[in-house]
Structures are given as structure tokens and as C-alpha cells.
Amino acid sequence: MEDVRQWLESYKKQLILAGAAAMVLAPFLWPFFLAVLFQVFCIAIPVVAAGTMIQMFKEEKLHGQKRTEERFYAKDSEIPAGAEVPGTGTSGSPEVPQADPVQEQDRETGDQPLKTSEQNGRSRSDSSCMAITWYQMEGRVRIFRLIRKLEKENIQSFSVSPEGICSVREKNGYRRVGALRAFPYRETHTLKKELGKDRIQATRKGRYLWLSWGKECG
């Protein structure tokens, strides 16, 4: 403390002069300080606004990608172009299964047709059960949600591709409106019965299943 007092005593006159000069010059320096602050705000506000807009754009882009993935999540069930359908070759002709020694022996005893029939029947039954389960657990909700959406546009029919992609017919072609995950397109016969219970008409046209309701069913 003693050192501070000595320093103040030694520079007492200089401090008084500096204080007096500051009081005299303050009215003239205030506009300069205000101008500096104004320039800082003019530069900072656009920078902050631009950074906020960039961040919002990135978030919107991420949300858009998520919505796109949710909308077109049917890639797992998608069949690549040119892929062979089980039971047919690339030209559509039935494949000739290789002979199995066990099956040859059963054929000689006359048991082969019965076993094959039982296996085929069991396979069809399992597929039908899976199609019914899919419709009751997931498909029915998604289809009715899509129907409510299309009715707001006065549309009463749409098509479903084997991959589950839903589209509506327009003047210049078709417009994609949704997707059905894990759509059991091989069991359209079973789906027709389930859809009919909900007053939805299902018609198979080529590779597509057309669903219609309301006036379109008439």
C-alpha cells in the first residue's frame, strides 16, 4: 500500500491533468464511440442472421432426408430389374428342377405327389397368413392414411407396385404419393379379400394392384 501511495503522490499532477482532459474531450469522443458500436452491430447482425439461416437449412435438409427414407423405405423388398422370378428363367419359361435322389426314391414308391402337394399347400398357407398379418398390423393403417390424404385432392384410386410404391394417375403420367413397407405383392389374392372387407376394391392390372373406393368402385 505504501508503494501505491508513493506512486500516486509522484504522479498526482499528471493524473489530475489526464482527468481534466478526459472531461473536456468526452463530449467530442462520444460520437466516435457510438459510431464504432453502430458499425459493429451493422456487421455482426448480418453475420449472425446468415449463420442462423445456414443452420436452419442444414436441419431442414436432414429432416427432408429422414422423411424421404421413411417414405421410400421399401428398398428392402425391392426386386432388381432383370432379376429372375422364382420358378421361371430369364425368358419366363419354367425352370426344370434338378432331380433329388430322395425324391426319386419317393417317386418310385408313389409318395412324391402327396408330399409335394402338402409342402406347396403349407407354403401357400404360410404366405397367406403373413399377408393377412401384414394387412392387419401395418398395411390397413397406412392404406387408410393414404386414402384420407388423397380424398382431400378428390382422388379415389391409386396403384401399388410390387415394391410397394404407391402412385396416382395424372394427365402427364403418374405421381408417387407414398410407399407400403414389406408389401406382400405375391399374395394379392389374399389382400383382395381383406381389402374387400373394408370396402376397398382391388384390381390386378399387370404388375400393379389398383385400389379404388367410393365412386370409383361403382
Image (tube, rainbow, N blue to C red):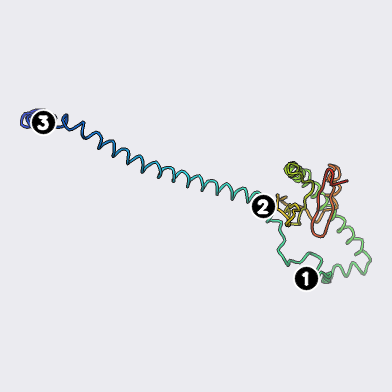
How far apart are the two marked residues, 1 and 2, measured between alpha carbons?
Answer: 27 Å
Amino acid at the residue labelled 1: Thr
Amino acid at the residue labelled 2: Tyr
Residue 207 visible in image: yes
Q: In the rendered image, which residue does mark 3 sit on? A: 15
Is 169 left, or right, of 4 in this rendering?
Answer: right
Indicate the position of residue 47 as horizontal and vertical percent values. Answer: 40, 45
Crowding at dot 3, Cα within 10 Å, few <14 / some 14-19 / many 20+, comes out as few
| Residue situated in front as seen by the camera: 26 or 67 | 26
Is 86 left, or right, of 33 in this rendering?
Answer: right
* Residue at 71% in and 56% down: 77
Indicate the position of residue 121 as horizontal and vertical percent values. Answer: 88, 56
Residue 214 falls in image quadrant: top right
Which label is found at residue 90? 1
The answer to which of marks 2 and 3 sits earlier in the sequence is 3
Q: In the rendered image, which residue does mark 2 sit on? A: 73
Amino acid at the residue labelled 3: Leu
Please, what secondary structure does the residue beneath circle 1 have? loop
Q: Nearer the viewer, mark 3 or mark 1?
A: 3
